[in-house]
Amino acid sequence: MLDRLKALIIREPITNNLREVFKIDMDVRELYLKNQVSGSSPEQLLILLLEGGERFIRIALNELDKENMQEVHNNIIKSQNIYLELFCALDQDAGDYVENLQGLYYLMYNNLLDANVKKDSDLLKDCLKIAVDLTGMWREVIAKSNEEKLALKDEIPPNTGIDIRG
């Protein structure tokens, strides 16, 4: 299960793209993000990306209320980039769930595109709900996978060694 999960999460390293997606100007925040990303497992990177997607949608909604259209656009684009990266990073050979995940990521990308063109707060709110649900779903899957991994670890008897003295 864990191997299939990892295959679904990520096909190739995406840490190089995180820097581009988040575009943080402050050196301290950039250093923090770099350290957080470089020391993260694929599962943690996935959650970071999903949380980033949520955060950028929330910022876009807030900026839309202020009628700051450039910031709305910028943050929707950041969120779109995250879902596009998640879509592209899926391993096509990982199993039955890949098509469903691709569909969700593609839906998010297209809905965000429409929301950006129309500056539609209702569509952005719908995207935020899906984003929150996706993050929650992945958190549950990862937690369950970690529980299974621990259960398997407990089932394996400790190495007692082999006595070759005869």
Image (spheres, helix red, strand yellow):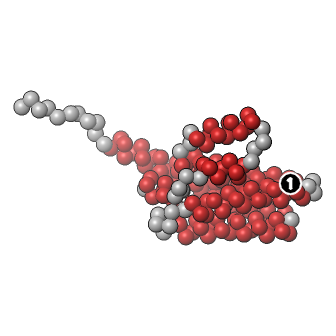
Instruction: Please report the residue visible at 88 percent of the width from the left and 57 percent of the height from the top.
Output: 70
Q: Point out residue 117 in the picture as x, y percentages from the top left corner.
A: 83, 68
Q: Secondary structure at mark 1?
A: helix
Q: Quadrant of residue 83?
A: bottom right
Q: Is there any visible trace of residue 69 in the rendered image?
A: yes
Indicate left or right for 74 with 52 as reference. right
Q: Residue lying furthest left in this view?
A: 166
Q: Which residue is mark 1?
A: 71
Amino acid under disc 1: Glu
Q: Is residue 64 left or right of residue 57?
A: right
Q: Is residue 1 above or below residue 160?
A: below
Which residue does the image show at 70% across and 51% down from the upper left? Answer: 20
Camera-nearest residue between 149 and 109: 109
* Residue 120 rendering spot, x and y as whole percentages: 85, 66
Which quadrant holds residue 150? top left
Q: Is residue 162 left or right of residue 28?
A: left
Can you see residue 47?
no
Q: Which residue is found at the position 79% from the left and 62% from the top?
A: 124
